[in-house]
Image (cartoon, helix red, strand yellow):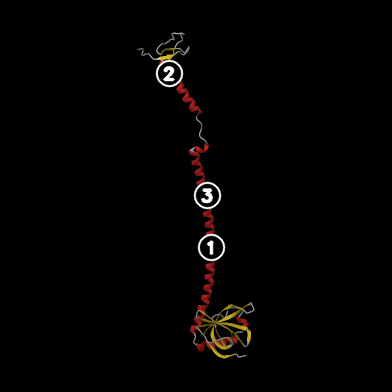
Amino acid sequence: MDNDTKTHCTNCGKEIPSKVDFCPFCGAKQASSTDSEVENNENATEMKKGDSQKKPRKKWYKRWWIWVIAIILVLAAIGAASSSDDSDSSSSSDESSATSTAKKNSSSSSSSSTSTSVRKSVQVLDSNSEDQLAEKGETNANQIRYGELIKSNDYYGKPYSISKGEVLQASESKGVTTLLVYIDDDTDQLFEVAVRGKTKAIEDDYVSINGVLDKMTDYDTQSGGSNTVPVIFAKKATVVGHDDN
């Protein structure tokens, strides 16, 4: 049995033994197995080169380094925006703090002034007996005209007395009774009297006051206007009569 493998002539195509170098029919030279392998390897190499050359390039958005650059740019923009917001917030906070401090200082100054005013008046009030206040207050009331009292605070801390004044209004708040009192039946000569604690005085009562002058205050009239009136601190208001008319 013939074990030789068969192949075909590369020229005439007839079946011939695979190991012959020349075709017995047409005489054409046949490629050896080594040459065939070399040729096949060359063909395979050429095919790989062709495949490599034909391999498509990656699209730009599929390249990793582009995305890294994009992320860095985005983070930088966010950082810049955040820095700007922090700066604006800090500026706003500084302005708000400055305004708040100014308000506190103003309020503190006003409160301090009022506190000082009350303290001095209270000290003078407490350092004199009722008889001394009445005597000194009556003397000052006779010497100082009402028109002079409302011009300045030069008389702050001086004893002052009202022998008979009529109560126009009376109100109580935080342990202090506030009376609006006018004298000599003249509503233009009006005093605000701050009396410690409660008092029996009501509207249209006649009262006697022995106290100490404090700094002036603004009084809102019933007609909607405002008047500046002297203030008297007193330990008590003695009711001496009532206006029945």
Name the foreground residue: 234 vs 177: 177
- Return the disc, 2 or 3, that comes first in the chain's sequence: 2
The amino acid on which the numbered mark 2 sits, given as a three-letter code, is Val
Q: Can you identify the residue that label 1 sits on? A: 98
| Residue 180 pos. (x, y %) | 58, 83
- Return the disc, 1 or 3, that comes first in the chain's sequence: 3
Q: Secondary structure at mark 2?
A: helix
| Residue 1 pos. (x, y %) | 35, 12
Q: Can you identify the residue that label 3 sits on? A: 80
Q: Secondary structure at mark 3?
A: helix
* Mark nearer the viewer, 1 or 3: 3
Disc 2 from disc 1: Cα separation: 91 Å
Name the residue located 44 percent from the left edge and 18 percent from the top edge: 39
* Mark nearer the viewer, 2 or 1: 2
Identify the image quadrant of the C terminus: bottom right
Name the foreground residue: 45 vs 24: 24
The amino acid on which the numbered mark 3 sits, given as a three-letter code, is Ala
Residue 150 against residue 18 in the figure, above or below: below
Quarter of the view holding residue 219? bottom right
Q: Secondary structure at mark 1?
A: helix
Q: Can you identify the residue that label 2 sits on? A: 38
